[in-house]
Image (cartoon, grey):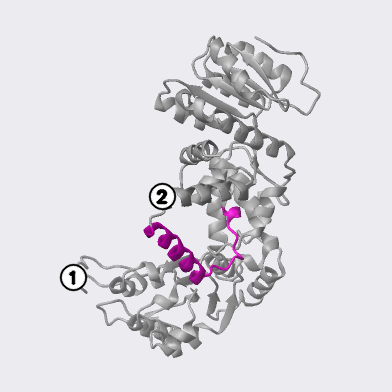
Amino acid sequence: MEASNLRDTSDRQILLVVDPDTDFLAWSKHQLETPETQVLLETDSESAYKTFCLRKPDLIFSEVHLQPFSGLELLIRLRKLTPDATVILTSAFAANQNVIEAMKLGAFDFVRKEQLPFNFKIVVDAALKATAELRAASAFPPQLTLEQYQDNMVGKSDALQQVFKMIGKVAASDVPVMITGESGSGKELVARALHHYSYRNHRSFLAINCAAVPENLLESELFGHERGAFTGATSQRIGRFEQCEGGTLFLDGIGEMPLAVQGKLLRVLQEKEFSRVGSNQVLKADVRILAATNQNLKEAILRKTFREDLFYRLNVICIQLPPLRARTEDIRLLAEYFLQKIAQQKHRPLLKLSEEAVKVLEAYSWPGNVRELQNTIQRASLLATANVLLPKDIPLGLVKEDVEVDENAIQRAVETLFALAIKGSEVPLLPWLQKELVKRAIKYTAEDQIQAAKLVGITPLALRKQLERNTGNG
């Protein structure tokens, strides 16, 4: 309908609106065109595709029902030509499958047409802002290829290098090793590395989480049982010690082990022998034992929930894993590793980290450690609409971990607000509070509505409605 052979050489952003309804196109241009934004209009998908190739617009806003091919097909073609193309689809009567398919194909958003009179400019401005951030982002090439990572132990920090050195020193011996560290810090990876570099690496490595097995079943799980040893024991069971004969047994969550089982484990460590539950037969155990905990076992000893003699048997060598917040320089390497694993396993294009995203990741304290980082990267890779991860894809970056919460101050504030309410204030308390929180969230997130909605705990649509009410109230 209207197009030029060249992209505007000014700094104006270009928006392409595609719809067979010329009245809607005229209304769109009136709503959206500003000195900073040029609006191009097309009535069919073929012309829209040609205009996109010629003008390279920053954003495409398209109806689903187009000719000669649909808006969904237009989305496919645009994303094939430019994988980072920002496309918003709309329709007056959108079938649910169209919404799902659009997001699956990489649409930035899908907006029902009846919502546009209320939030058209808000939605478009958010998309244009995201496009500008994407084009300004500096993408990091991965520091290492997937083949260069060893044993899934990723990191270059001094703290982790000390762990590697300790693994190298004790891997070849048969002494028990206690691995300590916060939940999610990678204790099982250390155990697997100890096994891999030991002379037992040709035999089995078995891991069991003592906290995940019911107390009455843990003894049978470790040592096995005979038929009829207890109710439900309908056949003989071979326990973990027999299963990994000559290999390595990793006991995670050792602090959760019942005292009765602790005594039997102590005998294995001292005598290298055990018996199945319900049997008097003594079996030999040539098994190296590695244990891990995120508890303070010395405190457990004082509480009489952990045997002191077992502690000293297991704690011959102790490897302390640092939390992720203590090795910030490893965060980028870990994130890149997880992205490469996802690309390989899911047969998807490799996502890169923007410089801004790395700063967000490094600023967060990661209370869930490496496991939390892995989950965050997996979630971000699913939700990202471009081949570069931006801060908007990583909501954890909005959390200021160094802020100390003054519970007394919060209580005083709540009491003050409630006192105003019961004195007959004409201002409804909860609507006023939500209005104020929305205003602050919008300012804090630099007008990123999706992240602001997450901060306040409401949906993006509810936030948009609140913004409209705020504007209407002055």
Q: Main secondary structure of the magenta part?
A: helix
Regarding residue 46, the answer to whether it shows in the image is yes
Q: Foreground: 170 or 32? A: 32
Looking at the rendering, the stretch of residues picked out in magenta corresponds to: 396-423
Do the residues under discs 2 and 1 have CB atoms within 8 angstroms? no
Q: Does 214 sit above or below residue 177?
A: above
Give the residue type at disc 2. Pro
In the rendered image, the quadrant that contains the C terminus is top right
What percent of the width, then of the height, locates residue 135? 72, 36
Q: Residues within 10 Å of mark 1 (few under 14, many from 20)?
A: few
Q: Which mark is residue 461?
A: none
What percent of the width, then of the height, locates residue 307? 41, 87
- Reply yes or no: does residue 415 show up in magenta: yes
Mark 2 or 1, nearer chain start = 1
Question: Which residue in the rendered view is the most extreme toward the right?
Answer: 9
- Reply yes or no: does residue 235 show up in magenta: no
Give the residue type at disc 1. Thr
Q: Residue at 62% x, 18% y: name it.
A: 29
Q: Foreground: 81 or 232? A: 81
What percent of the width, then of the height, locates residue 222? 37, 72
Q: Foreground: 305 or 224? A: 305
Q: Does 51 sit above or below residue 256?
A: above
What percent of the width, then of the height, locates residue 204? 48, 65
SS label for mark 1: loop
Q: Residues within 10 Å of mark 2 (few under 14, many from 20)?
A: few
In the rendered image, the quadrant that contains the N terminus is top right
Q: Does 144 sit above or below residue 47?
A: below
In the rendered structure, the answer to whether residue 390 lies left or right of residue 186 reads right
Residue beneath disc 1: 231
SS label for mark 2: loop
Residue beneath disc 2: 428
